[in-house]
Amino acid sequence: MKALLLVAHGSRRQQSNDEVVLLADKLRKKCFMHYDIVNAAFLELAEVLIPDGIKKCIDEGASSIVVLPYFLNSGRHVIEDIPNIVNDTIKNHPDVDIRIAPHLGASDLMMELLIASANSTKQS
């Protein structure tokens, strides 16, 4: 089974964390043809942390996990922290294929999204 783990920073503000969990729920409904499992996890400040998110996917039957960093820029969290956490977690699950996708801001679709978002504003 294939899993997608949406990873966000995490916030002290619960509503922000809830938005990420809701986004993962929406993704689950949209990408069921590609992923059997879709969950959310956080780098810090919120539950579920990345290692626990990976374990949750495995407990749900995942043999392959794509970790998708829900970050706009390639800062330290994207370049160092997330890969380090994932690589440490991989050691505990050598039989599971765990890969990190490019962060959201690196997507070629970002330009189209920005334009569509700007064009969706109401004109006065």
Image (tube, rainbow, N blue to C red):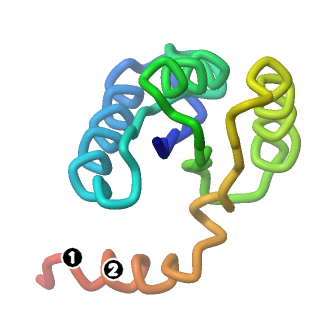
Q: Amino acid at mark 1?
A: Thr
Q: Residue at x 52, y 24 (%)?
A: 11
Task: Give the answer, above or below, for where 21 lies relative to 69.
Answer: above
- Name the image quarter holding residue 30: bottom left
Q: Which mark is residue 10?
A: none
Q: Which residue is mark 1?
A: 121
In front of the other: 49 or 73: 49
Where does residue 37 sit, x and y in percent of width and height? 39, 38
Mark 2 residue crowding within 10 angstroms, few (<14) / some (14–19) / many (20+): few
Please name the residue shown 32% across and 75% down the image: 117
Q: Callout 1: 10 Å neighbours few (<14), some, many (20+)?
A: few
> Tag 1's secondary structure?
loop
| Labelled pair 1, 2 in contact (Cβ < 8 Å) | yes
Pinpoint residue 77: horizontal percent, then vertical percent.
77, 40
Kindly identify the residue that appears in the image at 35 percent across and 41 percent down. Answer: 24
Q: Quadrant of the C terminus?
A: bottom left
Left or right: where 87 falls relative to 6: right
Residue 54 horizontal/vertical position (percent): 60, 26
Q: Quadrant of residue 45?
A: top right
Q: CA distance from mark 1 to mark 2?
A: 6 Å
Q: Nearer the viewer, residue 98 or 43?
A: 98
| Residue 118 - label | 2
Q: How many marks?
A: 2
Q: Position of residue 101 (x, y in %)?
A: 66, 57
| Rendered position, 115 above or below 20 | below
Dot 2 amino acid type: Ala
Q: Secondary structure at mark 2?
A: helix
Position of residue 73 relative to residue 61, above or below, is below
Q: Please name the residue shown 32% across and 25% down the image.
A: 15
